[in-house]
Amino acid sequence: MVKELRIAGFKCFKDIKLELNNLTLFTGVNSAGKSSAIQAILLLLQQRQSENGLLNGKYIKLGRFQEVRNTIINARKIDIGMTVKNADDEFECSIAINSEEKITKNNFEKIKGLDFVYLCAERIGVEDVYKQNLEKEYRIGIHGEYAFDYLSKERMNSIAEQDFRNMEEETGSNFGNQVDYWLNYIMGYSITAERIPGTEIVKVSYRKNADGSMDVKPQHVGTGISYISNVIIAALSCKKGSLFVVENPEIHLHPSAQSRLLDFFSFLASKGLQVILETHSDHIFNGLRKNINSKRIQAEDTSVYFFKQNKELLSTPVKILIDENGVIKNQEKGLFDQFDEDLDELLGL
């Protein structure tokens, strides 16, 4: 598990430390550093695929050093590091990038085996057909473009991590059963994906479980169902100790589905998957609080950061303290308080 993330001289950050946990939420106003914190993680992890280091690689393309250094403090160097803890060891892993774009690495041999899945905000949605992962480079793809191919291949196999199985009595134990359980729980649908022989495509269909209707193409169900399907598939492809990072998991989801999605993430995080979410949704945030209150996940196994900027336009993430009952202990202005402000205005308060 990644226990701590440190960022200095990178984009809007002067020098910060973030405590990461089983389930971590990044939220806050626009352009305050949430995406940049995710980018710092991606920049670290894509160094595993390069001998010389990369600002532009598998997960993220940042351009040149001058474009991503913190110009407010006139940073001459970027430092990004993390503390990793596993069953046998705790160690530091870091990179330093100078103005000549030379990257110095530390301890990257220790995280080459870290299983990591990242889904960006620009995920694949409704398509006539989906691509097969013929290159076999990355099982899901950063846009979720290979998620349905992964389902087509793994549907009848056992789920990768047995502890991630939902143990409801009527839920089967294979991968497809588990995907269907959570898709039905969140959206009321089940999914089928199959490779078309002699082609490079995957055919996907959905069925609404409440009325036993026939299978239909993705175009004939809500857009959010395709978006959430690849999130579920991606998460269930992981194992204990995997790191799963998702930007804006709430895309195209009704508030009730967003809340139930947090039941899914809380369940997996409580079983050993490390989940990092970037979100603008109060339903995601309150879904986490609900799960803490109901003891599906312990408060001490969660972290929430509210990103804001100070007068110098430097990012200053604030750790939001939530007690064992899901109660916020240090409410920040702008932390999902717009509903209350709008209601006050409507009531003339």
Image (cartoon, rainbow, N blue to C red):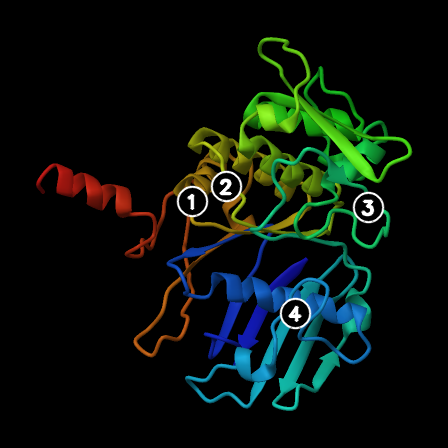
Are the residues at dot 2 and dot 1 in contact (C-beta closer than 8 Å)? yes
Q: Position of residue 311 (x, y in %)?
A: 30, 76
* Residues packed near mark 4 inside 10 Å, few (<14), some (14 to 19) or many (20 plus): many
Q: Which mark is residue 250?
A: 2
Q: Position of residue 20 (x, y in %)?
A: 57, 59
Q: Position of residue 252 (x, y in %)?
A: 49, 37
N-term mark: 1 or 3: 3
Is residue 166 shown to the viewer in this render? no
Q: Secondary structure at mark 4?
A: helix
Amino acid residing under circle 3: Asn
N-term mark: 1 or 4: 4
Tell me the residue at 21%/43% (across/down). Answer: 342
Q: Secondary structure at mark 3?
A: loop
Amino acid residing under circle 2: Glu
Measure the C-alpha gap from mark 4 to mark 3: 24 Å
N-term mark: 2 or 3: 3
Measure the C-alpha gap from mark 2 to mark 3: 26 Å
Q: Position of residue 156 (x, y in %)?
A: 84, 27
Residue matched to label 3: 133
Tell me the residue at 62%/65% (across/down). Answer: 41
Measure the C-alpha gap from mark 2 to mark 4: 24 Å
